[in-house]
Image: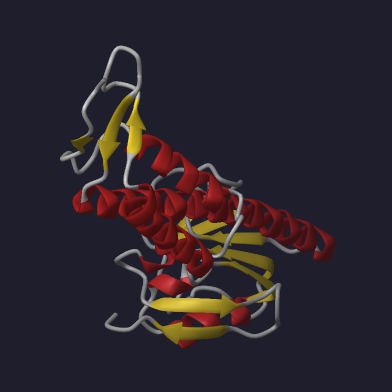
C-alpha cells in the first residue's frame, strides 16, 4: 500500500488540464467571466476541503498513489485555470474582430466603387485585409502601393468628401484628440467605416491605447467613447 503524501509542488502536471479546461470555457463562451471565476473558486475550495486529494498517475508504477492538495497548489490551480479561460476568451474575441475588420473593409470598398470615388484605408492592413486606392498611416512601411504618411488629426491635404469611403481600423483609440480625428475622417469621406477593439477584453488595454470605443459607424452614425483611466 502506498502512503498518501502532500503535493508540495505549486505547479505540477495537473496544471495542464486546469489550463485546458479554462481555455475551452473561454474559447467557446460557456460561462461569462464572473460565473466562471465563481465556479473555478468553488471547485478549488471543494477540492481542497472535501476531496482533499488528487490521484497522481506518476506517483507509482500502478498509478494508484494518493496525493493531497497543498494550499499553494490550490491557489496556483485556480490562477492557471483563470489564465486559460481569459486566453480562450481573448482568442475568441480576436477572431470575431478579425472577421469584423474584413467585413467592414469589403463594405467600404464596395461603397466607394458604387459612388465612383477613391477608397482610403487608414491604418496598416498587416495582411489582415487589403489595401485601399490609398492607404494612410502615421508610419507607413511599404506594405501598400499608394501609401500616405499623415496624422488623422490633420488631414488638411484632402478636400471635403474626396473619398467615397474610408475604412479606419484600430486607429482612433490611439490618438490624443479623438474628436478632431473623428471630425477629420468624416470631413473627407461620404461614408466612414470604423473597426475598433471592443472594451472588456485585455487587448483593449494595450499600453498605447488612450480610449475605450463602444460604438462607431457602420454600427451607429455616431462615435461613443470614454478615456481609459490614467491614459
Q: Residue at x 59, y 83 (%)?
A: 223
Q: Between 109 and 27, which is closer to the camera in this rendering?
A: 27
Tally the marks: 0
Decide if residue 154 is in sight here.
Answer: no
Q: Residue at x 43, y 66 (%)?
A: 204
Coordinates of residue 197 in the picture (x, y in percent)? 51, 65
Decide if residue 119 is in sight here.
Answer: yes
Q: Between 218 and 9, which is closer to the camera in this rendering?
A: 9
Q: Which residue lies most toward the front here? A: 1
Q: Residue at x 27, y 83 (%)?
A: 230
Q: Between 67 and 164, which is closer to the camera in this rendering?
A: 67
Whether residue 38 sits left or right of residue 131 in the image: it is left
Whether residue 77 sits left or right of residue 190 in the image: it is left
**Quadrant where the N terminus lies?**
top left
Coordinates of residue 196 in the picture (x, y in percent)? 54, 67
Coordinates of residue 74 in the picture (x, y in percent)? 28, 51
Applied colour scheme: secondary structure
Q: Between 58 and 118, which is closer to the camera in this rendering?
A: 58
Q: Residue at x 36, y 70 (%)?
A: 209
**Quadrant where the C terminus lies?**
bottom left
**Residue 181, relative to residue 133: is it above or below?**
below
Q: Which residue lies most toward the top here? A: 61
Amino acid at each position: 500500500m502506498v502512503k498518501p503524501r502532500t503535493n508540495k509542488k505549486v505547479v505540477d502536471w495537473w496544471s495542464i488540464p486546469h489550463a485546458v479546461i479554462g481555455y475551452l470555457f473561454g474559447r467557446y463562451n460557456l460561462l461569462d467571466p464572473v460565473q466562471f471565476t465563481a465556479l473555478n473558486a468553488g471547485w478549488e475550495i471543494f477540492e481542497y476541503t472535501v476531496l482533499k486529494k488528487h490521484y497522481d498517475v506518476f506517483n507509482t508504477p500502478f498509478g494508484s498513489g494518493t496525493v493531497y492538495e497543498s494550499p499553494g497548489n490550490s491557489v496556483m490551480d485556480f490562477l492557471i485555470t483563470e489564465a486559460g479561460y481569459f486566453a480562450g476568451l481573448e482568442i475568441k474575441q480576436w477572431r470575431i474582430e478579425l472577421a469584423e475588420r474584413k467585413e467592414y473593409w469589403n463594405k467600404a470598398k464596395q461603397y466607394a466603387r458604387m459612388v465612383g470615388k477613391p477608397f482610403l484605408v487608414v491604418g496598416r492592413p498587416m495582411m489582415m485585409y487589403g489595401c485601399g486606392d490609398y492607404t494612410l498611416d502615421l508610419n507607413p512601411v511599404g506594405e501598400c502601393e499608394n501609401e500616405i504618411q499623415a496624422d488623422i488629426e490633420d488631414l488638411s491635404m484632402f478636400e471635403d468628401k474626396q473619398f467615397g469611403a474610408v475604412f479606419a481600423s484600430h486607429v482612433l483609440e490611439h490618438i490624443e484628440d479623438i474628436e478632431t480625428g473623428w471630425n477629420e475622417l468624416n470631413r473627407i469621406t461620404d461614408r466612414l467605416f470604423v473597426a475598433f477593439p471592443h472594451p472588456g477584453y485585455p487587448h483593449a488595454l494595450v499600453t498605447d491605447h488612450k480610449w475605450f470605443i463602444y460604438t462607431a459607424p457602420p454600427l451607429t452614425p455616431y462615435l461613443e467613447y470614454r478615456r481609459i483611466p490614467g491614459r
